């Protein structure tokens, strides 16, 4: 937070669509992996009451402080953890919080981080080049900009920013080092590639640096794999992404997990034994309406994808957690929170 305290707030994106996609129900258990301003979390708790529970995670300690205040009315049913969602399974095991009815990932950064944090996420403010969600992490945007070899810098800007002028920008950065502030970097990029169209010429490079600093794509791939194993039968996974690199990972993951055989097409007989673990809920990606974009322009690039955990009866599942789901699914008991304790025992003993 800035020294004067927070001044902005975050408007949750695709709020009613998220609640629908999560199929929030009273007494359900949910995980919000990206608490932010707790807008989604508060709405989930309102709909999950009475009896609902929420585990909220955020890498940014400031987000946890804000969320604690916002969720005060539900303090007995909410557990907030300042950690990276790449540790999702170990957090759930530590706090005995699985299986769950729904998991939400609302990726990227909050308005508070963008406007207020003083951590250099935006070139609208002159801040140190930091860009860490978690201020205890070692690598910052400045360390990447000032110590990476030119080729690596160009690759980061190209791969994570999809910036066609990445080589030119990297060359000029290396010549101008050290670069320690957002204004210095933004000005240098503008001088290097000039203004084209409506978006600021530094937009793509700033996105690339933020993704690299926080290892956002690697962490996304990791959390998706973990999330699927924490969902109870018919539990929902909902992901809101904000750029094509994130959305591609989510789309490919959901499609892969919704398929049976994943052998290469030239393989005559299935050797993979892959069985679908998800059913895709919305075949067409959900995007904000024109009204939402007018009210909250930051929602404009949002894409929501949702999937439901399934079990295919009669299929022999490879892993013990799948076997547990099968028992739960067939007995129809898993949705009753009152026996969650029993489910956990089965789950852990399997
Ligand atoms: C778009 S905001 C979430 C806003 C929230 N849904 C709301 O309604 O206020 C994304 C949040 O996710 C957090 N975040 C991003 N990557 C993370 C990660 N790998 N682990 C934990 N938190 C992360 C950011 O710190 C930020 O607070």
Image (cartoon, grey):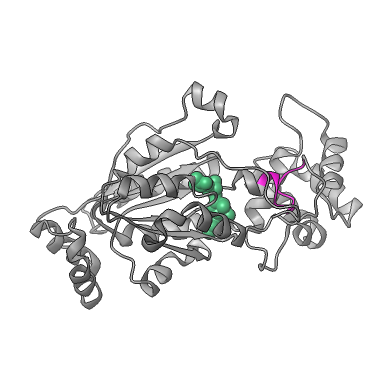
Q: Residue at x 73, y 44 (%)?
A: 122
**Residue 159 is at least partly visible in this image:** no
User: In terms of depth relative to the viewer, which is nearer, 215 or 44?
Assistant: 44
In the displayed image of the protein, which residue is found farthest to the front?
Answer: 73
* In the image, residue 44 above or below residue 54: above
Which quadrant would residue 77 be assigned to in this image?
Answer: bottom left
As for residue 121 lying within the magenta part, the answer is yes
Q: Residue at x 49, y 50 (%)?
A: 38
Number of marks in the rendered image = 0
| Residue 222 position within the rendered picture, expressed as x and y whole percent measured from the top left | 46, 60
Q: What secondary structure characterizes most of the magenta part?
A: loop
* In the image, residue 14 above or below residue 94: above
In the displayed image of the protein, which residue is found farthest to the right?
Answer: 176
Which quadrant would residue 347 be assigned to in this image?
Answer: bottom left
| Residue 216 position within the rendered picture, expressed as x and y whole percent measured from the top left | 57, 54
Q: Residue at x 21, y 53 (%)?
A: 269
In the displayed image of the protein, which residue is found farthest to the top?
Answer: 290
* Quadrant, the N terminus: bottom right
Left or right: residue 290 compared with residue 230: right
Which quadrant would residue 55 be assigned to in this image?
Answer: bottom left
Left or right: residue 138 compared with residue 236: right
* In the image, residue 253 above or below residue 348: above
As for residue 266 lying within the magenta part, the answer is no
* In the image, residue 267 above or below residue 86: above
* Quadrant, the C terminus: bottom left
| Residue 75 position within the rendered picture, expressed as x and y whole percent measured from the top left | 42, 60
**Magenta region: which residues?**
114-123
| Residue 4 position within the rendered picture, expressed as x and y whole percent measured from the top left | 75, 52
**Residue 192 is at least partly visible in this image:** yes
């Amino acid at each position: 937070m800035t020294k004067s305290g927070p001044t902005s707030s975050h408007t949750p994106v695709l709020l009613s669509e998220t609640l629908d996609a999560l199929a929030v129900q009273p007494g359900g258990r949910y995980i919000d992996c990206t608490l932010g301003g707790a807008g989604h979390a508060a709405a989930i708790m309102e709909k999950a009451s009475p009896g609902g529970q929420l585990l909220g995670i955020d890498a940014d300690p400031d987000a946890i402080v804000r969320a604690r205040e916002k969720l005060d009315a539900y303090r007995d049913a909410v557990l907030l953890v300042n950690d990276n969602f790449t540790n999702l399974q170990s957090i759930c095991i530590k706090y005995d919080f699985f299986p769950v009815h729904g998991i939400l990932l609302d990726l990227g950064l909050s308005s508070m981080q963008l406007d207020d944090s003083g951590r250099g996420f935006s070139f609208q403010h002159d801040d140190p080049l930091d860009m860490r969600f978690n201020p205890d992490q070692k690598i910052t945007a400045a360390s990447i900009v000032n110590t990476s070899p030119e080729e690596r810098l160009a690759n980061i800007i190209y791969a994570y920013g999809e910036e066609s002028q990445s080589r030119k920008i990297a060359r000029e950065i290396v010549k101008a080092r050290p670069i320690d502030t957002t204004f210095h970097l933004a000005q240098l990029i503008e001088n290097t590639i000039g203004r084209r169209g409506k978006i600021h010429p530094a937009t793509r490079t700033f996105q690339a640096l933020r993704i690299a600093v926080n290892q956002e794509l690697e962490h996304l791939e990791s959390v998706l794999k973990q999330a699927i194993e924490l969902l109870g039968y018919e539990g929902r996974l909902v992901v809101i992404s904000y750029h094509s690199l994130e959305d591609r990972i989510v789309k490919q993951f959901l499609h892969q997990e919704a398929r049976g055989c994943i052998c290469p097409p030239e393989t005559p007989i299935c050797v993979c034994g892959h069985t679908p673990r998800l059913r895709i809920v919305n075949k067409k990606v959900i995007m904000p309406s024109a009204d939402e974009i007018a009210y909250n322009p930051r929602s404009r690039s949002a894409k929501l994808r949702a999937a439901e955990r399934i079990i295919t009866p009669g299929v022999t599942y490879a892993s013990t957690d799948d076997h547990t789901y099968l028992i739960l699914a067939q007995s129809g008991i898993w949705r009753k929170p009152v026996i969650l304790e029993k489910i956990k025992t089965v789950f852990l003993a399997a």
